[in-house]
């Protein structure tokens, strides 16, 4: 599963050329520390005593962010920390928007010029089990999304469709929070449309609508892209199914 900068090719091929994305496997802490040191990324003091998993996730996310920045802005931006504000929102160089995620064994980040879009959000998740999808479905999906899941989910299983809606909402939240600074719930963001996923290439386009302020009638339309990937450890062990989403608010 290698693509441009570690991003699955099935996702990368959908992305507008103005968006730079990168992914990095969450490997051993020693290897992540070596790579982080090479890129002049330091672990914040607040994470020095965090559990191993959190430190590995943080470093894989920041390594991805730095690679995406270098791709967008050139080698002068190949090294250094990406700090965060008090809300945990990453602080990008001036004129840049972006987002970081870590999950399902990968760090994942994307950046773009603020002249191309107002916000970007990324997310990577392990595809949930059938039991989790049925248990969590009504809490996470709107009635319309439940219909979408049941009726028009060509090419996707119920578990994949649930994970897609969940991940797209998380991405949308990350794209919108830095702009509006409002906490949104699952019912405030709706996956309106999903294309693709027929055939071997399990990827496609998304459209979402978010209600930012119901009383003031502030809404946002977002577009995005997704891919479902599978990789096995090569030793005959269980395969890992992942869902990647990247959403932009213009
Ligand atoms: C922010 C949030 C979406 C992160 O999702 P997650 O699945 O826990 O974690 P991910 O690995 O995908 O993303 C974590 C990264 O998101 C970024 N992030 C954290 N808070 C953020 C925010 N408010 N806005 C934008 N990005 C944020 C950070 O870079 C963080 O990584 P870091 O701490 O290593 O820097 C989630 O924790 C949250 O606050 N949710 C509340 C709102 C919500 O989920 N509503 C339902 C969907 S609309």
Image: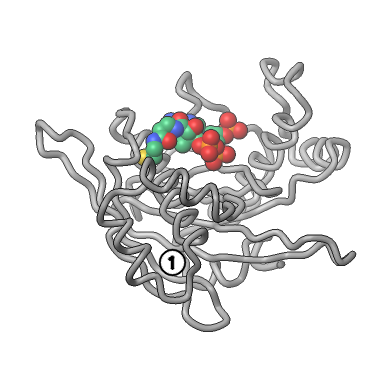
Residue 88 position in % (x across, y down): 50, 26
| Residue at point 77%, 38% (across, down) | 36
Residue 24 visible at all: yes
* For residue 10, above or below residue 223: below
Q: Secondary structure at mark 1?
A: loop
| Residue at point 47%, 62% (across, down) | 158
Instruction: Find the residue positioned furthest to the bottom.
Output: 199
Judging depth in this view, the residue of 101 and 197 nearest the camera is 197
* For residue 34, above or below residue 89: below
Residue on which the image places disc 1: 16
Residue 125 position in % (x across, y down): 58, 50
Q: Quadrant of residue 80?
A: top right
Q: Locate the N terminus by quadrant.
A: bottom right
* For residue 183, above or below residue 144: above
Residue 214 position in % (x across, y down): 14, 35
Q: Is residue 220 left or right of residue 183?
A: left
Q: Is residue 141 left or right of residue 35?
A: left
* For residue 195, above or below residue 52: below
Q: Quadrant of residue 22?
A: bottom right
């Amino acid at each position: 599963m290698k693509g441009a900068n570690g991003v699955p090719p099935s996702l990368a091929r959908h992305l507008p050329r103005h968006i730079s994305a990168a992914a990095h496997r969450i490997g051993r802490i020693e290897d992540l520390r070596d790579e982080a040191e090479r890129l002049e990324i330091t672990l914040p003091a607040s994470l020095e005593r965090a559990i191993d998993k959190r430190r590995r996730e943080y470093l894989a996310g920041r390594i991805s962010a730095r690679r995406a920045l270098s791709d967008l802005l050139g080698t002068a931006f190949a090294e250094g920390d990406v700090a965060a504000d008090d809300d945990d929102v990453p602080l990008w160089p001036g004129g840049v928007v972006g987002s970081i995620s870590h999950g399902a064994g990968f760090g994942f980040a994307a950046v773009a010029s603020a002249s191309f879009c107002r916000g970007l959000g990324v997310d990577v998740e392990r595809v949930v089990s059938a039991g989790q999808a049925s248990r969590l479905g009504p809490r996470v999906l709107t009635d319309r999304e439940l219909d979408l899941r049941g009726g028009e989910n060509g090419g996707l299983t119920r578990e994949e469709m649930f994970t897609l809606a969940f991940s797209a909402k998380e991405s949308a939240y990350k794209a919108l929070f830095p702009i509006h600074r409002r906490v949104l719930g699952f019912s405030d963001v709706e996956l309106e449309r999903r294309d693709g996923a027929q055939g071997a290439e399990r990827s496609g386009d998304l459209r979402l609508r978010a209600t930012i302020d119901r009383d003031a009638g502030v809404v946002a339309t977002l577009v995005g892209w997704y891919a479902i990937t599978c990789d096995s450890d090569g030793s005959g062990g269980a395969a890992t199914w992942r869902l990647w989403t990247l959403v932009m608010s213009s």
